Amino acid sequence: MSKTAELTTTKQTPLAEARPERSFVNRYLHSDLTYNGLSLGIFLVLWSLLAAIAKSPFVPSPAQVWDAFVQLYQVGDVEGYTLKEHISMSIVRILSGFGLAAAMGIPLGLLMGLNPKIYDRTRSIIEPIRFIPPIAWIPLSIVILMGFSRYVFLIWLGAFFPIWINTLVSVPRVNPVYLNVGRVFGGDKWLRIRKVVIPSVLPDITSGMRVGLGMAWMCIVAAEMIGGEGVGVGRLILKYAELLRLPEVVVGMLIIGVIGFAMNEIILRFEKWMFKWRWEVSI
């Protein structure tokens, strides 16, 4: 056999023969779920070791935190509010403020992205407000607003700007080739917006929503700590911080982290499902 024939034979070797398919057990052992479980186990071991070395009431162990969680779940807090009430109230506040932020930030970002002069002529008002931390608005919101609206306003303030700015900056980045194709096929301005611009910017919008969701949780915890009402995860943390009962404080912190993680995963999986063509969707 000539060298040319050998090279041809080598090139035509099927990929399946070169790389045999891994077994189910092998795939499972090397899956992200396995590595995440291993990482969590290592974290818990290190945490337990730290608590054992410190031997301090201010460094609760995972077992103490678990006992505090069970107690809060079964009995409630020092004021009689159940853990379910704290969690459900915080989620309702988050969804209300975050939903309002998305409902306002996305259309306004599209409008200003399509008409840059609107942004240019209003940026002297919008940009200074964007750089004011939402926490700085808490004293003013306590004086002006009452009850539920106070929390919705602060969450909206934290989530609005990441959603709005991501939408705004993504519109000019739409590939002009797509717009030209729509124009060549006779599409008017509104058709091009619906069929070209909006589908192109949706991945950036969902990324902004994920950032806004994180900001919303930061705002709700601060607002609940200072807001005065007795229910909410932020208020739960403050109650037990004042009593120096750190296991219950850590329970509240972990609840926020787990719920925030779950909400972020929902948005991320929706993003991956809807935009399979966009390879950048990976985080």
Image (cartoon, helix red, strand yellow):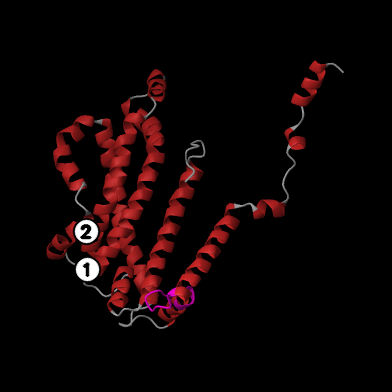
For the point 42% across and 54% down, which residue is it? 264
In the rendered image, the vertical position of residue 18 relative to residue 156, given as above or below: above
In the rendered image, the vertical position of residue 280 relative to residue 174, given as above or below: below
Image quadrant assignment for residue 122: top left
Residue at the front extreme of this rendering: 53
Distance from disc 2 to disc 1, alpha carbons, whole Å, reads 10 Å
Which numbered circle lies on residue 226?
Answer: 1
- Magenta span of residues: 54-64
Task: Tell me the crowding category of disc 2: few under 14, some 14 to 19, or many 20 or more residues within 10 angstroms, Cα based.
Answer: some
Q: Position of residue 224 (x, y in %)?
A: 26, 67
Which numbered circle lies on residue 244?
Answer: none
Q: Which amino acid type corresponds to the residue marked 2 in the rendered image?
A: Ile
Q: Report the front residue among 105 and 223.
A: 223
Image quadrant assignment for residue 154: bottom left
In the rendered image, the vertical position of residue 250 relative to residue 9, given as above or below: below
Q: Are marks 2 and 1 in contact (CB under 8 Å)?
A: no
For the point 48% across and 40% down, which residue is it? 275
Q: Which amino acid type corresponds to the residue marked 1 in the rendered image?
A: Ile
Which numbered circle lies on residue 135?
Answer: 2
For the point 27% across and 57% down, which residue is it? 155
The quadrant of the rendering that contains the N terminus is top right
